[in-house]
Amino acid sequence: ILNVEQSPQSLHVQEGDSTNFTCSFPSSNFYALHWYRWETAKSPEALFVMTLNGDEKKKGRISATLNTKEGYSYLYIKGSQPEDSATYLCASGNAGGTSYGKLTFGQGTILTVHP
Amino acid sequence: EPEVTQTPSHQVTQMGQEVILRCVPISNHLYFYWYRQILGQKVEFLVSFYNNEISEKSEIFDDQFSVERPDGSNFTLKIRSTKLEDSAMYFCASRVTSGVGEKLFFGSGTQLSVL
């Protein structure tokens, strides 16, 4: 059974603070790591898909890194804004199935940014 | 931007009843998925579907579950005889190709409550 873990479970920061959270995943048979941003009552929205060890991706104030050898990824948010408040989900894809869309999710990190 | 739409947003049913959850994936997407999240638990994979057949399914996806793409646009999940433990948020997702780095596009979910 694949286990993807995220930490912390929840995080409260002040507007303007920079923050980061962690996703750990099985490194065996790894092929992709997905990060999603999920606001209440909306669709989870893909932020990044990373496949290569050492990958770094950036989208505005949000960036992510990937270490496939040790099985972890970090998500960074620089200068947090109240609109960044959401649940951040990571999901790992590991070979063994027939579908690259079969992902194993972590439990999510709930970020609250206070004005 | 094109999006995955799901109906209804909430469904309440009695134990033992059949339910059909409906999804309209993005029009040029070829790979379709159902995931679910039981309250307080992780998002979990149910099934993937391509070329009018199931390509992969999880242990959860037993004989009570079925999927169908009855026409060129809808993708449905049927639960034949609902149980209390089927209560969850059900997400439909789609992607353009099977590529390893391809992101999934999720709908906003159907909250199923089985009484």
Image (cartoon, coloured by chain):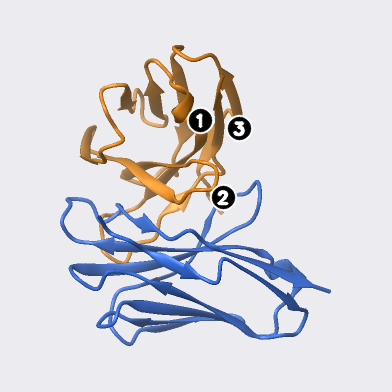
| Residue A43 numbered tag | 2
Chain identifier, colour blue: A
Residue depicted at 28% across the width and 82% down the height: A70
For the C terminus of chain A, the image quarter is: bottom right
Circle 1 sits on which residue? B87
- In space, the residues marked 3 and 1 are separated at their CA atoms by 13 Å
| Residue B9 numbered tag | 3
Q: Nearer the viewer, residue A72 or A56?
A: A72
**Image position, residue B112 (x, y; %):** 54, 29
Per the image, label 3 sits on a secondary structure element best described as loop
Residue depicted at 61% across the width and 32% down the height: B9
* Image-quadrant location for residue A94: bottom left
**Image position, residue B91 (x, y; %):** 47, 41
Check if mark 3's residue and mark 1's residue have beta carbons within 8 Å. Answer: no
Q: Residues within 10 Å of mark 3 (few under 14, many from 20)?
A: some
Per the image, label 1 sits on a secondary structure element best described as loop
Left or right relative to A44: residue B96: left
- In space, the residues marked 1 and 2 are separated at their CA atoms by 19 Å
Give the label, 1 or 2, closer to the camera. Answer: 1
- What is the drawing colour of chain B? orange
Q: Nearer the viewer, residue A7 or A34?
A: A7
For the N terminus of chain A, the image quarter is: bottom left
**Chain for disc number 3:** B
Three-letter amino acid code of the residue under disc 2: Ser
**Image position, residue A56 (x, y; %):** 41, 85
Left or right relative to B71: residue A16: right
Three-letter amino acid code of the residue under disc 1: Ser
Q: Earlier in the sequence, mark 3 or mark 1?
A: 3
Three-letter amino acid code of the residue under disc 3: Ser
